[in-house]
Image (cartoon, rainbow, N blue to C red):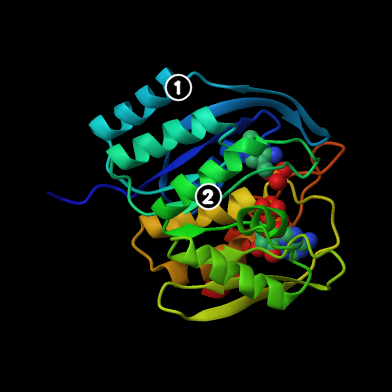
Amino acid sequence: MVDQFPQALSIAGSDSGGGAGMQADLKTIQERHVFATTVLVAITAQNTLGVKDAFPLPTKIIDEQFAALDEDLQIKACKTGMLADVTRVKAVVANLKKYDFGPLTLDPVMIAKGGAPLLSEDAVIVVRDELLPLATIVTPNLPEAEKLTGQTINTTDDMQMAAKKLQNMGVQNVIIKGGHFENDNQSSDFVLLSNGRSFWLSAPRVNTANTHGTGDTLSACITAELAKGNSVEQAIKISKQFVDATIRDGIKVGHGHGPLNHWAYRKVEANAEV
Ligand SMILES: Nc1ncnc2c1ncn2[C@@H]1O[C@H](COP(=O)(O)OP(=O)(O)O)[C@@H](O)[C@H]1O
Ligand SMILES: Cc1ncc(COP(=O)(O)O)c(N)n1
């Protein structure tokens, strides 16, 4: 059979403000020329000023979304974002064990930039023990890596140690994002691959409050690149450049932590072609 157009899946929560969550995933996957599909796990009433309310969806409709996709589509890579609570994490784990949607990028979303919880405290252990071993790559920010490993992260050495711990927990590849090291003039992420290779991806830190959805965008881009058949290393490198462009070439939307410019990477690619 002729291969179908590359298809990727975002399993996440909706951000009504359009900057993060499933909306950021859809915009990113589309920008990478991959067909985006979705399993909606929760709905948030949210804007750039914060999360006003959140409503986790019943597991029945979560299961039905997975079944509908499996019946018809040929999904080559998937990612998880906001999973809300123990019930939803367990539902997603069960579905990912039931169906093959390709390599899983696990973005262990826990707390929104504005401070609102997007994953209940008791669900962290379920993510660690049940979802992490299913993932091809995990993409925690610093507070998420601290929660998952139980260690504090104050230095770059701590980041490397935490990455090794995560790998020992059963995930093949790890990227620990350094966006929260706000006193550094670089934004540096540490990558540890399944073959033991490790490296840093750094970019000059952009002095901006408009970083709503950076983590979602990075993990969605990795997912899109994996759906095209790129290696984990290629996918991570392209995604760092992609998210960097979306932050650097910013737009003004809303009055708080504004969203990214999801079409900024087009200019980078156009310049590269000249
Ligand atoms: N101010 C910034 N300037 C440049 N890159 C940034 C900035 N903030 C975050 N990043 C990058 O954005 C990506 C997402 O990181 P981070 O913001 O830590 O994730 P999250 O949204 O999950 O908290 C990483 O590649 C990080 O290095
Ligand atoms: C539905 C949803 N999913 C994820 C995030 C995390 O994004 P950020 O950490 O940039 O606030 C969010 N705010 N809302």
Identify the residue position indicated by label 1 in the image.
59
Q: Amino acid at mark 1?
A: Thr
> In the displayed structure, would residue 149 be above or below residue 231?
above
Mark 1 or mark 2, earlier in chain:
1
> In the displayed structure, would residue 10 be above or below residue 59?
below
Q: Viewed as shown, does residue 256 lie left or right of 82?
A: right
Q: Amino acid at mark 2?
A: Arg
Identify the residue position indicated by label 2 in the image.
128
> In the displayed structure, would residue 253 be above or below residue 71?
below
Q: Quarter-wise, where is residue 207 in the image?
A: bottom right
The one of 234 and 174 positioned closer to us in this rendering:
174
Q: Residue at x 79, y 50 (%)?
A: 210
Instruction: List x then y, in percent, for residue 42.
Output: 57, 27
Indicate which label's residue lies in the foreground, 1 or 2: 2
Neighbours of disc 2 within 10 Å: few (<14), some (14-19), many (20+): some
- Helix, strand, or loop for circle 2? helix
